[in-house]
């Protein structure tokens, strides 16, 4: 198997961690008395990121590398390109969702305290959210952009640092909205870019 494939497999850490967060949020929502439909959707999302996405990605890589389906090479190659795009650019929007879910879990945990404390997150809760979020952001910045031109890895690291600073200074609700907005914008841009690249290749 080509060396760069091992780097692509390392990308899977992000969706797997995100899937775990979906399951943990489902557990916390269940404790808070949330609707069974919402919990069910969270568990489906957890299964999607932990099992389905890695399985499809590894299946596609294996099929292409070992030529298991020679008549479907073109379709698999297109799917592989989207898989790489999904994990390359998708790693960013997945980290945003990870941060948003951590904030949501912190808000659920703080529902028993006053609104003032709930809105202005305490220092311990900030560290509980920001440290994993920033570490995951730095991880994908260095993994994906390590050999990129124009120092893009440092741009990405600074970007996550700025987002972390914004989250530090904002309320829980504002931080959650910010991260969900960034996830939506990045996901849309990724798919538009993929369609454009497919049209010119």
Image: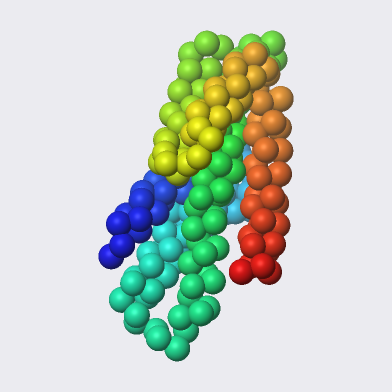
Q: Compared with residue 26, is residue 121 higher up or lower down, i.e. above or below?
A: above
Nearest to the observer: residue 35 or residue 187: 187
The residue lying at 52 percent from left, 45 percent from top is 91
The residue lying at 71 percent from left, 38 percent from top is 181
The residue lying at 48 percent from left, 75 percent from top is 76
Name, please, the residue furthest toward the bottom.
71
**Does residue 98 appear in this view?**
no
Number of residue marks: 0
Q: Where residue 83 sits: x, y (%)?
A: 50, 61
The residue lying at 52 percent from left, 64 percent from top is 81
Which quarter of the figure is the C terminus placed in? bottom right
**Does residue 68 appear in this view?**
yes
Q: Compared with residue 155, is residue 21 higher up or lower down, i.e. above or below?
A: below
Q: Where residue 155 sits: x, y (%)?
A: 55, 30
Which quarter of the figure is the N terminus placed in? bottom left
- Relative placement, left or right, of 88 versus 170 is left
Name, please, the residue furthest toward the front.
150
The figure's colour scheme reads rainbow
Q: Where residue 180 sits: x, y (%)?
A: 67, 38
Asked which quadrant contains residue 156, the reply is top right
Q: Where residue 37 sits: x, y (%)?
A: 64, 53
Nearest to the observer: residue 17 or residue 25: 17
């Amino acid at each position: 198997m080509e060396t760069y494939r091992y780097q692509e497999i390392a990308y899977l850490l992000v969706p797997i961690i995100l899937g775990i967060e979906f399951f943990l949020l489902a557990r916390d929502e269940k404790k808070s008395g949330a609707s069974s439909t919402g919990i069910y959707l969270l568990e489906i999302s957890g299964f999607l990121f932990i099992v389905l996405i890695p399985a499809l990605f590894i299946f596609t890589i294996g099929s292409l590398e070992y030529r298991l389906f020679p008549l479907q090479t073109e379709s698999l190659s297109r799917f592989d390109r989207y898989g790489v795009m999904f994990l390359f650019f998708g790693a960013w929007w997945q980290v945003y969702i990870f941060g948003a879910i951590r904030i949501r879990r912190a808000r659920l945990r703080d529902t028993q305290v006053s609104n003032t404390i709930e809105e202005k997150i305490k220092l311990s809760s900030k560290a509980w959210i920001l440290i994993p979020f920033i570490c995951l952001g730095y991880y994908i910045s260095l993994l994906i952009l390590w050999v990129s031109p124009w120092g893009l890895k440092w741009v990405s690291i600074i970007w996550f640092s700025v987002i972390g600073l914004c989250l530090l200074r904002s309320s829980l609700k504002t931080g959650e909205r910010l991260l969900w907005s960034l996830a939506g914008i990045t996901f849309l841009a990724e798919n538009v870019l993929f369609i454009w690249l497919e049209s010119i290749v």
